Image (cartoon, helix red, strand yellow):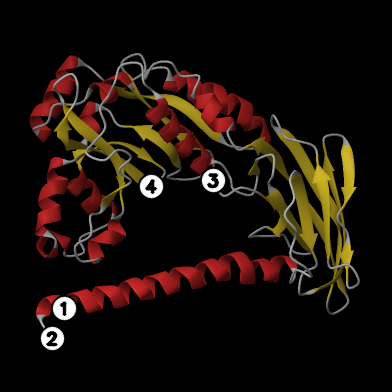
Amino acid sequence: MTKTQKNILIGSALGLFLLVGSGMAYIWYNVYQNWDSLGERASIQEDRSGLYVTNGLGSDQIQEILVLEIGGNEYSLSVDADATERSVELPPVTSIVPYRIYGEAMMEGDTSLTVSGDGVLLPNDFLKKEMAKAKTMEAFFPTWEEAVRQLNPYHAGLVVEETDARFSPEEIAKAQERLDVKLPSYYLELAYEGRAWQVTIEGEESGKAFRLLAPSELMSAAEWVEKNVGNIDWKESRADIYRQLQKDVVFAVSGTEPWVIRYGDKPCEDGKRAMYTGRINYEDFLVEDSDPFTDYTYPGGYCDKAGDLTYWQGLMASALRDALPKEGFTFVTEDTELEVNRANESPEGELKGYLRGEWY
């Protein structure tokens, strides 16, 4: 067997292994974990249209008396050994709608727990519509402010603020010389009144939902990886990638995900080179022949067209969605099947719950 044939065989086996592993992970998360929190479903739901919420009896429960309060109405979601699952249809959600669940769960071993939880339901496209209100790159700062103003009454815990870092011509020139790049217009236009800005998460030491780096804070992607991931011998083992990341520039960070400028390989209509904006997946450094710079939105790079903000509106909406507490903000479509899930943490003697909706 030739070396090439061996590589093909190994690659095929690895691909099959990853496919099976991904499938088992999906099954564990969406089935077994769900059974542990809700109880094994007695039947498979028939295809149906409309917004529904379902509660199931937990494998460690004898009975659960549960009420969902939403939109001025109350719905019973009680279950027991004779009826291990209950579903009710809800009115369409067209704006932010608060909800509350409460009741009591009788557990195995003759113990009972108070059941409680609250949050809000939002249309799945709510954040995209909010970010679509930004008509210029600079307008994303006040657009974030307005979106957060609507979300914070429901415990989003976000703060939008300018930083002290300036976008002065001198700082821009120094950054371009230091990094040996021509900074793209979209980066410079993201500044608000000549300053960098950020969105922080209250109560978290390093909680940054989004941060636009000032010219003085810009760094190469290689430097960012070394500072935030550590040296995992990739400089030597992935020398080609290391050389490329030295040319790439981190200009913003969403959560722990750096946004990276990389020049593309095609010319745009204005004669400038196309650019990519994506994220770094540091785990890919451990995989041979992988590219740790992922999420290419446009093959060959992105051409920055004046007035076309769709791409950036999507990036900003994604950053905001990732920053929201997952158990407090539930996104739905007109045909979502909501599920009552147990929260990750509950006080002693209580059982916290929330409604799980669309993943994205």
Q: Which mark is residue 1?
A: 2
Distance of label 1 from label 2 (alpha carbons): 6 Å
| Residues at circles 3 and 4 in contact by the CB criterion of under 8 Å | no
| Residues at circles 2 and 4 in contact by the CB criterion of under 8 Å | no
Where's the C terminus, which quadrant? top right
State which tag comes first along the sequence, 3 or 4. 4
Q: In this picture, is 276 found above or below 215?
A: below
Q: Which mark is residue 256?
A: 4
Element marked by disc 3: loop
Q: What amino acid is found at the position of numbered circle 2 in the picture?
A: Met
Distance of label 2 from label 4 (alpha carbons): 44 Å
Q: Which mark is residue 360?
A: 3
The answer to whether 1 appears left or right of 72 in the picture is: left
Q: Position of residue 318 (x, y in %)?
A: 47, 38
Distance of label 3 from label 2 (alpha carbons): 46 Å
Mark 2 residue crowding within 10 angstroms, few (<14) / some (14–19) / many (20+): few
* Camera-side residue of 287 and 335: 335
Residue located beneath label 1 in the image: 5
Element marked by disc 1: helix
Where's the N terminus, which quadrant? bottom left
